[in-house]
Image (cartoon, helix red, strand yellow):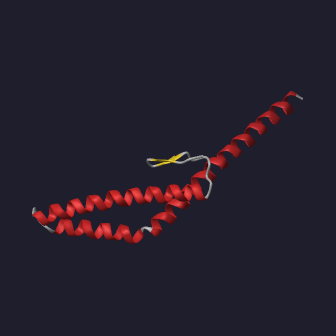
């Protein structure tokens, strides 16, 4: 009888741990899917950033290179901010209540 009770308790803990594990993995999978969708949507901007970085590297230590470096940094910061904002917007749309913040953006409950 004691063995049966211990087995039932162990089985209950196993089911409970599987439930929480699935819940955490499901949240992680949903976030990964959202991030991939946003990255695909912003792919053209990412290619433009790569081309801008390549152009900046082609110039030597000229004034043009410094200007392109500054332009690249500005576009990179905007890209990152827009990416984080878009992911946060999609998290809100899909109502993933387990996530309270993304990047520097706090999500309202």
Q: Is residue 64 above or below residue 16?
A: below
Considering depth in this image, is 54 or 5 the residue closer to the camera? 54
Residue at 43% in and 67% down: 42
Number of marks: 0
Q: Which residue is drawn at 53% across and 48% down?
A: 107
Give whichever of 61, 86 is nearer the camera. 86
- Compare residues 78 and 44 and report the one nearer the observer: 78
- What quarter of the picture does the N terminus occupy? top right
Q: Is residue 85 left or right of residue 59?
A: right
Residue lying at the far right in this picture: please name it.
1
Taking the spot 21% from the left edge, 61% from the top edge, the residue there is 69
- Residue 72 location, x and y as percent? 26, 62
Q: For residue 62, what is the image quadrant?
A: bottom left
Q: Where residue 97 sits in the image (x, y, percent)?
A: 62, 48
At 55% from the left and 61% from the top, the residue drawn is 33
Q: In this view, does 63 lie to the left or right of 48?
A: left
Q: Quadrant of residue 75?
A: bottom left
Residue furthest to the top in view is 2
Q: Where is residue 98 in the image (x, y as percent from the top left)?
A: 61, 46
Tell whether 49 sits left or right of 21: left
Instruction: Determine which quarter of the picture holds residue 65.
Output: bottom left
Q: In this view, does 39 lie to the left or right of 76?
A: right
């Amino acid at each position: 009888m004691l063995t049966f009770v211990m087995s039932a308790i162990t089985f209950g803990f196993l089911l409970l741990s599987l439930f929480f594990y699935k819940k955490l993995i499901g949240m992680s999978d949903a976030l990964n899917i959202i991030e991939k969708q946003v990255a695909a949507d912003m792919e053209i901007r990412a290619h433009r950033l790569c081309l801008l970085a390549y152009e900046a590297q082609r110039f030597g230590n000229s004034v043009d290179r410094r200007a392109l470096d500054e332009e690249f940094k500005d576009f990179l910061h905007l890209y990152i901010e827009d990416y984080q904002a878009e992911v946060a917007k999609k998290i809100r749309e899909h109502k993933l209540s387990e996530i309270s913040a993304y990047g520097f953006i706090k999500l309202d409950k």
